[in-house]
Every structure is written in C-alpha cells, then in structure tokens.
Image: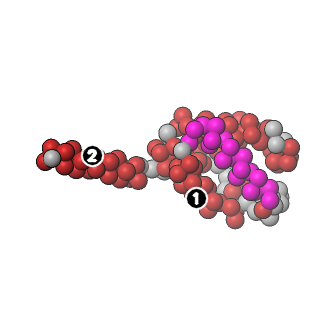
Amino acid sequence: MKHTLIILFVSLFLGLSACSSTSNQSVYTQMGGQQKVEEVVDNFITEIEFDPVIFEYFKDSDIGRFREKLIEHVCHLTGGPCEYTGDTMERVHGGMNITEADFNRGVDLFINAMDKANIPHPTQNKVLAILAKTRKQMLYI
C-alpha cells in the first residue's frame, strides 16, 4: 500500500512538472520551433493560392519576400529567436481595405495551415491570441 502511494505521488508530481514546463516554454517552442513555423507558413501560402478571395490580396506580391517576412514575424511574435525586419503592418496592408470577413477568412486559412502542420489545438489558440493583436493594424486601411 505504501509503495502504491509513493508511485501515485511520484506520477502526480511528474505529471504536474510536465504541465508546468510546457507553460514555461515560449509558444514558438510549443509550436515546434523554426521548422514548424516554416511549415505553417508554407501551408498558409498554399491555402492562399487555392482561395480565390484571399488570393486577390496576394496576386501581385513577391511570395518569396512574403514567406521570409511572415516566418520572421510569426517567429518573433511567438517568442522565438527571430527579429522581424519587415515593414509595419499598416504599411504592408495600407490601401488593401481588408474587410473583417476577409480577415476572418485569412484566419481560417491560417488555422488550416496549422492543422496540416499538426500543431496541437491548445498551441494554435495561443498563436491566434498573439496574432490577433495585429488585427487592427490590417483592417480597412
């Protein structure tokens, strides 16, 4: 009986330690680091390519630069080691007059991209909460 209680206590302690270590990790690390950020961005670009509404916003874009700067931005915002060297969100999205409906559609595409990269849903929620802070910098400008 005493042996069983010790095993139970150790199991509980190890389980709690694992939970707290995840919460102490950056969202970038929880995503899986640079490789996963790149995978999500590549998936997102593919999602955009096959969405006729959202593709219109990107049809004249330099996709190589877009990819590079989005990887930097996601990496930086989620606590990774990257420095974002791109333009402000207002400058990038100025003149596009992005509607809330199209912004939300883009978010859905980004969720699809994270799903395809096997990012766990709790981590996806953390990523979205971080990226949502840039929303006002993109709409109707």
* Disc 2 residue type (three-letter): Ser
Query: What's the CA distance linking mark 1 and mark 2?
Result: 32 Å
Span of residues in magenta:
101-119
Task: Give the percent coordinates (x, y) of residue 97.
Answer: 83, 60
Q: Quadrant of the C terminus?
A: bottom right
Q: Residue at x 27, y 46 (%)?
A: 11
- The residue at the far left in this view is 2
Q: Residue at x 54, y 54 (%)?
A: 126
Queried whether the magenta region covers residue 116, the answer comes back as: yes
- Secondary structure beneath dot 1 equals helix
Report whether residue 74 is seen: yes
Q: Residue at x 57, y 57 (%)?
A: 130
Queried whether the magenta region covers residue 124, the answer comes back as: no
Majority secondary structure in the magenta region: helix
Q: Which residue is mark 2?
A: 11
Residue 129 tag number: 1
Q: Nearer the viewer, residue 102 or 10?
A: 10
